[in-house]
Image (spheres, rainbow, N blue to C red):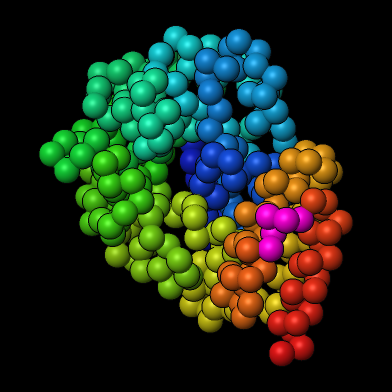
Amino acid sequence: MQNLSRHIGTLTLKTPIILAPMAGITSLPYRRIMKPFGAGLVVTEMVSANGLIRDGVKTRELLATAADEAPLAVQLFGDDPAVLSRAAQMLDGDEELLDINMGCPVKKVVRSGAGSALLKDPVRVGNIIAAVRKAYPKPLTAKIRSGWDAQSINYLEIGRILESEGADAVTLHPRTRSQGFAGQADWDQITQLKSALSIPVYGSGDICCGADASRMMSQTGCDGIMLGRGCYGNPWLIGNCLRTLQNLAEIDPKPEDVLKVALQHLELHRQHFGERKALFEMRKHLSWYTKGFSGSSAFRAGLQTITSCRELEDKAREFFAEVISA
């Protein structure tokens, strides 16, 4: 079998697949569900550096981890080099890698000067990485986009700055901030960035099946891929990406397999967050787990009237029983 391990600084990943940090999605229960399917690295939701240095309770909660998800990366966001440096020093030490968010397109984040807003200020990008690199001894990476808009595409400049200031790897989502998630990701930009840098380059964007992963890596020469929205309700995407990289056929999960994982996810969420939040959060996850099955639209519509996790479990069992017997 082909050796799929990868190195980022001093960290060795067993596979070239990274689970992307996604606000409101990649909580501890979600990461624990995804990890066994073959993710070489999982990443927290993005954590506010300002919130961390102010000892925000909710911010600290985002850093909760479990042994079975290792290795874990923490992603910080902010716009002040000194604050990010201090926040990096305050991490618990359970993480194996620190990533700096320089690509988030969300208005709230951008208005604060963080996320993809940093792409408009290459000098600040360099100052941030230099300051964090001085304070943080473990592998350090950054996630970026192509640029702010079509008139200011500068991922090559940003990538070179990241490398020169001590970043150990970079992930490129080849869309501009103004694009959001619309249009098609320009994988040629991943090719160009990989050619320009000597540190590992990971590609992200438009990977919906294993064949996409294989095509991205062969087309761009990138060192690995970062999976995001394609994993919603579909942890099997990770395994299928690995299978195609090994020249094996992809596998579609059976309905009973989907139900088993969905219920495991529900229970992990309930244990970690409690009944109320689990009920609220798992409505969206169950909508994703049931997507594509007959009757899923009616199932999703009925989720909003459910008032307990037990009822949520019962409805999921009823839905998949009908799918299996059809």
**Measured from the top left, where is residue 178 in percent x and y?**
26, 41
Residue 94 lies in what quarter of the image?
top right
At 63% across and 63% down in the image, what residue appears? 301
- Point 72% across, 32% down: residue: 64
Magenta stretch bounds: 302-306
Residue 187 can be seen, yes or no: no
In the image, residue 95 sits, relative to residue 24, either above or below, namely above
Image quarter of residue 28: top right
Residue 176 visible in rendering: yes
Q: Position of residue 239 (x, y in %)?
A: 59, 67
Q: Nearer the viewer, residue 120 or 106?
A: 106
The overriding secondary structure of the stretch rendered in magenta is: helix
User: In percent of the image, x 17 and y 43: which residue is there?
Assistant: 150
Residue at figure coordinates x 49%, y 55% from the top left: 229
Q: Is residue 305 magenta?
A: yes
Residue 92 falls left or right of residue 6: right
- Nearest the viewer among 45 and 251 is 45
